[in-house]
Each structure stands twice: as structure tokens, then as C-alpha cells.
Image (tube, rainbow, N blue to C red):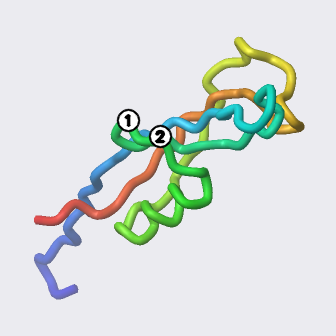
Amino acid sequence: MGKGQRAQAMKWQYLEAYSSVKAGGKLGKNGYRVLTLNNQDYRLSEGLDFLGQQGWELTAVHSIDEAHGGELSRIRTLTYLYIFKRPLDE
């Protein structure tokens, strides 16, 4: 940078998505984790791939609650908040 020039601060766009367990199979014994985006559920890995292809970077994961407790087919039933960011187009 030349004299008198300042670095411009990067501007970010943020996205929140929730991850929870969906019961499937006979008597709901085959649970799997989903990521909910715009009221649509994606299997967790598919949702993360989808967001990654759109330029979103996962920045944080927070546990929301333990209201359901226990496990469902060895998948924790906790709900998580995933926070993503990507550069804001100017």
C-alpha cells in the first residue's frame, strides 16, 4: 500500500442454519441429522456441501438446548445453530 492508502475492511454477509435430528425408518429408529435452510431440510453433509458451493464458510456451531436429551440411534438429539459467512458483494 502506498502512503495515504488504507486497507478497506472486508464486509461480510451472515447466514444462520439449524441442525436437528430427523427420525426415519420403522419406529423412527434410523435417525439422521439435517440442516434446515429456508424451511427445507437437507441431510447435514448435503446441506454443508450446498452452502460451500455458494461460497459460504462455516464460522461457528453452537448447541441450542438439551430439551430432548438422550440419543436417537446414537445420534444426539441436540439442536445446533450453524453460523456461516461469505464476503458481501459490493
Tags 2 and 1 touching, CB below 8 Å: yes
| Res. 39 mark | 1
**Residue 73 location, quadrant:** top right
Badge 1 crowding class, 10 Å Cα cut-off, few under 14, some 14 to 19, many 20 or more, is few
Please name whichever residue, 75 or 83, is drawn nearer the observer in this view of the structure: 75
Query: Quick one: quadrant of the N terminus?
Result: bottom left
Q: Residue at x 76, y 29 (%)?
A: 28
Query: For this view, does 85 lie left or right of residue 12?
Result: right
* Residue type indicated by callout 2: Thr
Vertical order, 72 against 12 (above or below): above
Please name whichever residue, 77 or 89, is drawn nearer the observer in this view of the structure: 77
Query: For this view, does 29 lie left or right of residue 12?
Result: right
Query: Quick one: quadrant of the C terminus?
Result: bottom left
Please name whichever residue, 26 or 73, is drawn nearer the observer in this view of the structure: 26
Report the Cα–Cα distance between label 2 and label 1.
6 Å
Q: Residue at x 41, y 71 (%)?
A: 53
**Residue 75 location, quadrant:** top right
| Res. 36 mark | 2
Image coordinates for residue 5, horizontal then vertical, percent: 14, 77
Q: Residue at x 67, y 42 (%)?
A: 33
Q: Outermost residue toward the top? A: 67
